[in-house]
Amino acid sequence: MERIFSVLTERDISLPIFVTGVGYEHYQDHVTRKEGFPNYHLAFCEQGVGKLIICNREYLIEQKTAFFFYPNVPHEYYPVAEPWSLRWIIFSGSSVHTLLNAAGIGRFEVYMLNSPEEVTFCCNKLHKILLEKKSTSMLEASGVLYNFLANINKLIEEVNSEGDTQLIKKLNSIIGFIKNNFKKDITLEELATHAGISSSYLCRIFKKEYGISPFTYILRCRVNAAKEELINFPDKSIKAISLDTGFNSCSYFGSVFKEYEGYSPNRFRELYFMPQ
């Protein structure tokens, strides 16, 4: 399989997703792109070992590992144990971001593939389609790539720059951070930065381990703190408690509290202090 790049027409570029190139590097060279690459880029290691440096993180890219990044994300990758062989697909389109976001794929990702043959099949099929150079080739290639990306979560298990053994430490660190900061506005990006992982990976590992999203856990921490204040400070207003525990709106606090506890904050307080 050789490298092949698409000759794009205006009709091709108007597609929601289109393939700009596909190829295979038996001996992958050292690549440094300080300004990033203009297209979305997916690469898959078939043999050897290499290293990817992206966003101040380092990843070992070995057999059955794939890496992906958005356009214009600075990066560097190079072989460690040769031959380092990579298959790659580069693509673009107006709907790519929406599709990747729905699949939970962030600005860059590193994956261990549980079905690497699916990637090889996709690359070979795209190469064959583009090689035919028919008027409908890009339309066909677009459908193949769209279907592959829409189902990519079935093929992957994400890894991080420190290895899977660090997973529990990262989760404990996230839980500790939330418990110390839940009264503030915490963003998903802030949690991901704290843990040193991508936002999409954070959501996946958190929900897999705890069965809820990080945001739901934050809400539960706030409700629990509000319960303590309702009981410990019986003269404190509901509005003051809602603000003290991280809720920006008293009405929102009331609806969340009732959803989780089955009672309004006032009723919860009344039940606790009800004469025996």
Image: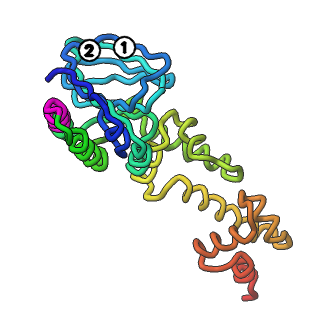
In the depicted view, which residue is nearer to us: 118 or 111? 118
Residue farthest bottom in this picture: 276
Q: Position of residue 267 (x, y in %)?
A: 71, 82
**Residue 58 percent location from the top left of the image:** 42, 22
Discs 2, 1 touching: Cβ within 8 Å: yes
In this figure, what is the number of numbered marks?
A: 2
Q: Which of the 4 quarters of the picture holds residue 248?
A: bottom right
Residue bearing the label numbered 2: 28
The type of colouring in the image is: rainbow
65 lies above or below 272: above
**Quadrant of the image for the C terminus?**
bottom right
Q: Which residues are magenta?
A: 121-133
Q: Which mark is residue 31?
A: 1
Quadrant hosting residue 52: top left
Q: CA distance from mark 2 to mark 1?
A: 9 Å
From the viewer's side, name the closer residue of 138 and 172. 138
Mark carried by residue 237: none
From the viewer's perspective, tell me whether residue 133 is left or right of residue 220: left
Residue 116 position by quadrant: top left
Q: Is residue 125 magenta?
A: yes
- Dot 1: what SS? strand
Q: Nearer the viewer, residue 101 or 154?
A: 101
Q: Is residue 155 visible?
A: no
Left or right, residue 102 beside residue 192: left
Residue type of the residue flagged with mark 2: Gln
Amino acid type, residue under disc 1 in the picture? Val
